[in-house]
Amino acid sequence: MTVVVCVIIFSITLLSSFSRRFVIYKLPQYKINETGSGLDYMYLDPSVEDWQLSKFLSNTTAYLMYNDDPPSLDYKKGHGHTKGALHFDKDQGFWLSHSVPRFPPFPERGYGWPPTGKQNGQTALCVTYKYSQFTEIAKQLLYYNPRVYNCSLPEIFLPALSNLSYICQGSKIPQLPKRRVWKLVSARGESFLNFAKSLYYVDDIYAAWVAQVLKSNLLTETWQRKEHELPSNCSLPEHVYNVKRIRLPGPVLFYSYFDHSKWCVSQLFRDQWSCIGDLNREDRQAWKGGGLLCTQNPLIYRAFRKAISWFILYKLPNDKKGSGLKYLYMDESSNGWIFGKNNINDSGSAVAQTLEPLFKYVERKTEGFGYLLYNDQPPTNKVPASSFGHSKGVILLDRQTGVWLSHSTPRFPGTKRTSFWPENGIYFGQAFLCVTYPYKLFNDIAKQLQYIHIFSFDYAIPQTFPLDLQCVAQRTCYPKKAPWDRKLEMTSLAGSTFVSFAKYARYGDDLYSGLLVEPLGDDLLAKGWGRLHNPLPSNCSVKHNVYNVKSVKLPVIPPFNITSDHSKWCVTMGKKTGIWTCIADMNREISQMRRGGGAVCTSNTAVWKAFSKMVDRYEKCP
């Protein structure tokens, strides 16, 4: 009979205080009136009051730790520049990819952070996969050729995971192609592209391969030293730019020189790629194995690509040659319009990616998330009273940040990723402005929505979220006294400035000539819906004139009449000092003088230039 006592922390008198200490009593094969397996045992730990018979008689889990700079061992040439760990059983497990030298420690030594890991920034990506995915992960790791310093792979995993056995034993890697890209699917159904290169693929993984496959310009952050760093690369169709400074919430600012992490993101918001990996952009690492895991998860993308705080999207009108689903897109990085890669109703479009948190909430009720959908022409058949504002938009937020998406599209959005775009949304042009703001700003944004007097048709606002947002979602609050308009200056999460103008129904005047033109300080070109019952003419009776846009021109396509364009926007003529562009809710119509509405305006030069060029023809004053 054998008694085994396992002590992981020091004093045995503290046994009942720590769950990491346990006692095992291995039972003999021959017991009184009974013959056992010889493998049975009982255990005692702080969670139980008496001996418990264990149900586990054999090792059914596997793990593998690898690091090109492992703990307590000397550096060894010939392996890939890669760091990580696997742990799994026959059901599922995780793959941890990280950038930390000498981590994690050997399991028998307990968890610890290496002293050398204090100085520089590091990243780690941990994803849970079903067991079936580990055969493909094992194939990918053959290309990485990692240096394994601790491994346990029981026979029950063979021969299915024989590739891992090669790696664990340090055997010579079989002949392989130079590189491989494979789609992995997490246990929750999220897709990741894994790029794996061997030492025989002698090139920069970012510029030569990943950027070209993703068809996206990349901003790359890797550990670089001056004598070996690769410069930004614009020689191929898709470019790669080196990040020089990093900004995290707080704000926390630091230079790339002090950051040992390896990651990249799409330069343009529409692509939404984020990759975390192993390799640096250095000349010597072209001869190293390693890889990247890439995802289009919008939350991960926004977290890494903080510079993207807004985008403007213009859905093109339908024509005889088109589908009515193409769109133009711009953000801080695009310097004007570019064509969207997907149709607007595609799950990969910028709009769909923005709405992804909403889709996930509807599927599984994400904790700490809230949303508000409003539209004077909602997806339901219910037609709101004309006392509600002529306004359409989406609010999505958690307790740190939120998105305000204002738009002009009737019956939008649906709450499922397969049907978020309305069937009748193909015919006319539409405009979207999406801005990410800090959470604390949404109480003020809610007040703007009260003046607009939005018609909310769907919402879920946690009770801990701003009270003003809750009451506007419930349609129970609106202005009770003058003034009947409100102005709000807003700063996006990345520091871009916007101004919201809102008017209540009792304001009783045109949004453009009555509210916007004076503070914008210049003549205004206003674009509205071209199929109105009682449109207002261009107005030259105020200090700054307001002219009605009659036709619109966009890149590549011929000019079109405003009867095929449902968007609402305005742009200053640039005669004075201020250059402003506003995405608005309202038309210049007599009936809409007595309705709530608003506009969000920006003085961004690239936006102003893009919208100014769109004015093909405008109406002179009578």
Image (spheres, helix red, strand yellow):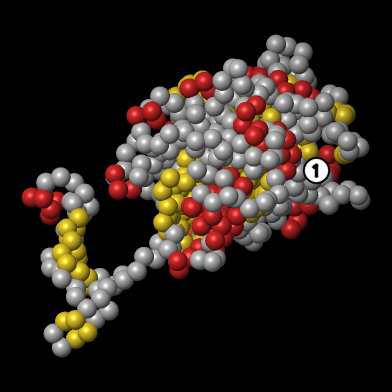
Is the N terminus in the top left, top right, bottom left or bottom right quadrant? bottom left
| Residue 92 in the image, given as x and y percentages of width and height | 46, 62
Q: Quadrant of residue 88?
A: bottom left
Query: Measuring 49% from the left and 53% from the top, which residue is drawn there?
Result: 169
User: Residue 440's quadrant in the figure?
Assistant: top left
Residue 567 x, y percent position in the rendering: 74, 40
Residue type beneath disc 1: Leu
As helix, strand or loop, the secondary structure at mark 1 comes to loop
Give the residue drawn at x 54%, y 55%: 166
Quarter of the picture containing the C terminus is top right
The 10 Å Cα crowd at callout 1, few under 14, some 14 to 19, many 20 or more, is many
Residue that mark 1 sits on: 316
Image location (x, y in percent) of residue 313: 71, 38
- Nearest the viewer among 169 and 411 is 169
| Image point (76%, 16%), residue name | 574
- In the depicted structure, whether residue 13 falls above or below residue 82: below
Q: 320 or 571: nearer the eye?
A: 320
For the residue pair 561 and 246, the one nearer the viewer reads as: 246
- As drawn, which residue projects farthest toward the bottom? 33
State which quadrant residue 541 falls in. Answer: top right
Q: Residue at x 60, y 55 (%)?
A: 139
- In depth, the one of 582 and 23 nearer the eye is 23
Name, please, the residue furthest toward the top: 577
Any part of residue 22 in sight: yes
Residue 515 visible in the current orientation: no
Say if 347 sits above or below 398 in the image: below
Residue reaching furthest to the front? 172
Q: Is residue 25 above or below residue 473?
A: below
Task: Residue 11: give x, y in percent of width and height.
Answer: 11, 46
Q: Residue furthest left?
A: 13
* 108 up-or-down from 619: above or below: below
